[in-house]
Amino acid sequence: MPELYSFLFKASQKIAHFHYSIGMVMHPSFYRIRFHRMKANAIAIFLLAANISWGQCDDFEMTIDVMDPTCMGYSDGAITINVTGGNGGYEFTITDEDGTVVNVAGGTPNVLPFGWYYCYVEDDSGCVLYDSVYLDDPDPVEAVVILTQPTALGSCDGLAEVDTVLGYQGSFSGLLYFWSAGGPAGLGETIKSDLCDEFYTLTINDEWGCTGVFDFAMGSAEISTSANHPMLLCFPNPFNDFTHISTGNSIQPANLSIYDLTGRCLRTETTEGTNYLLERGDLNPGIYRLVVGNLSSTLIVAE
């Protein structure tokens, strides 16, 4: 039986690529390992039996084609393994992070969510290829909507305008906008006017079928809600000269509006960042409704 040699190795991963330092120990072994650098992953070729010559596995190579999920939260990602060389009779196994086989009957999996996957190929002679790939979850479709509140309680002269759309797939010009309450719909319909004291919904679809849904309220419709949104915090509250406004992870910048209990808008300004210093200014002591983007809370000015 010819002697084979094992290769001891240690790997250190850099940001964009891998480096390997390899030392060779001369002793009989039933396997040996060779490393290639490919797509920033180490591909190991294992010779599992002592009677396999190096040449039998020397030209055994694989490439992996991946397709990320189309939209955030979708499970339509795919992995395709392409093999060259080897000795035929290939066995393909793809597992997820939990070790579950995702290519049942050796097929090409195409209903995959985001995450790490591990690809294993073995031929008739016991030569093995191994690699790992990551399917990325796309960003959600998000929008910055600028709201101009009705000028008075009962007025229907409010305006909503889409300022920015983030996380969409395809082209910006291909985005479809659908406004509730009989609003405009279709390409480029980024503005809805004549808004009253009501709740509204905007739905945005991109060219790949990804969807973002945004609820917002105008005028006294927002004031009339008694619940305070848990992401919108004011400290101190009640306050005298100023209070700190925290909006969690909401999109910034956002419109900040203060209403009295009749639904009259007293002040509108634009926040910069998720932590914002609100000054009292000309507000009299009393109870107000604070609206930041789509979030609302009670605001109390002390005596």
Image (cartoon, rainbow, N blue to C red):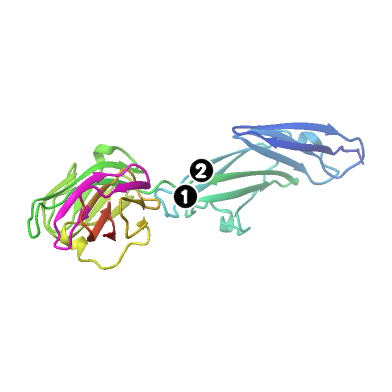
The residue that appears at 26% across and 56% down in the rendered structure is 290
Q: What residue type is labelled 1?
A: Gly
Coordinates of residue 207 in the picture (x, y in percent): 30, 44
Q: In this view, does 162 lie above or below 265?
A: above
Q: What residue type is labelled 2?
A: Val
Q: Name the residue under label 2.
A: 66
Is residue 135 visible in the rendered structure shown here?
Answer: yes
Quadrant of residue 174 in the image? Answer: top left
Q: For this view, does 279 lie left or right of residue 123? A: left
The residue that appears at 72% across and 47% down in the rendered structure is 124
Coordinates of residue 244 in the picture (x, y in percent): 36, 51
The residue that appears at 28% across and 38% down in the rendered structure is 172
Is residue 90 visible in the rendered structure shown here?
Answer: no
Q: Mark 1 points at which residue?
A: 77
Mark 2 and mark 1: span between their CA atoms? 8 Å
Quadrant including the N terminus: top right
Quadrant including the C terminus: bottom left
**Which element carries disc 2, helix, strand or loop?**
strand
Give the magenta range.
258-282
Does 260 appear in magenta? yes
- Mark 2 and 1 residues: CB-CB less than 8 Å, in contact? yes
